Image (cartoon, grey):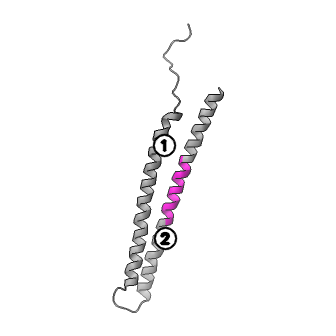
């Protein structure tokens, strides 16, 4: 009975660790999106304030950095989620508790 409870608690620990990892991954993605928005809005602000009629290299650099953060954040999010799901599936068998076979006759 103690062993069964320990396995169940271990399973809960693994499930919670996976959920924490996924939430951390989502939080990182939101940080990258926020940073990208700051760089793009900085580029737009500089474009509006500047008196030049042409694109400045600063504006182009800010747009590129902003979109770079966005692309990097999205790629990192999907890679981390994919790795987390693979690790979870790999170790899921260790904690899988097979259900008792109800068709067997052990009452003899």
Q: Residue at x 60, y 34 (%)?
A: 8
Dot label at residue 35: 2
Above or below: residue 3 compared with residue 49: above
Question: What residue range appears in magenta?
Answer: 18-31
Among all residues in the image, which is located at the extreme right? 2
Above or below: residue 74 compared with residue 88: below
- Verify whether residue 76 appears in magenta: no
Picture coordinates of residue 100, whole percent (x, y): 53, 22
The residue singled out by tag 1 in the image is 88
- Verify whether residue 19 appears in magenta: yes
For the C terminus, the quadrant is top right
**Local SS, label 1:** helix
Disc 1 crowd, CA 10 A, few/some/many (<14, 14-19, 20+): some
- Quarter of the image for residue 16 reads top right
Which of the two discs, 1 and 2, labels the residue nearer the N terminus?
2
Among all residues in the image, which is located at the extreme bottom? 51
Above or below: residue 92 compared with residue 69: above
Picture coordinates of residue 77, whole percent (x, y): 45, 57
Picture coordinates of residue 76, whole percent (x, y): 44, 59
- Quarter of the image for residue 70 reads bottom left
Q: Residue at x 51, y 19 (%)?
A: 102
Among all residues in the image, which is located at the extreme left? 54
**Local SS, label 2:** helix
How far apart marks 1 and 2 lie (CA) works out to 30 Å
Picture coordinates of residue 84, whole percent (x, y): 47, 48
Is residue 25 or residue 3 the one in the foreground? 3
Is 71 on the left or on the right of 26, as rendered? Answer: left
Is residue 46 or residue 61 the one in the foreground? 61
């Amino acid at each position: 009975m103690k062993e069964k409870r320990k396995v169940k608690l271990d399973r809960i620990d693994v499930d919670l660790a996976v959920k924490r990892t996924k939430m951390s991954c989502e939080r990182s993605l939101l940080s990258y999106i926020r940073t990208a928005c700051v760089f793009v809005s900085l580029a737009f602000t500089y474009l509006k304030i500047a008196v030049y009629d042409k694109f400045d290299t600063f504006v182009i650099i800010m747009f590129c950095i902003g979109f770079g953060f966005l692309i990097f954040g999205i790629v990192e999010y999907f890679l981390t989620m994919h790795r987390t799901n693979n690790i979870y599936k790999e170790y899921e068998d260790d904690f899988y508790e097979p259900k008792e076979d109800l068709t067997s006759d052990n009452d003899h």
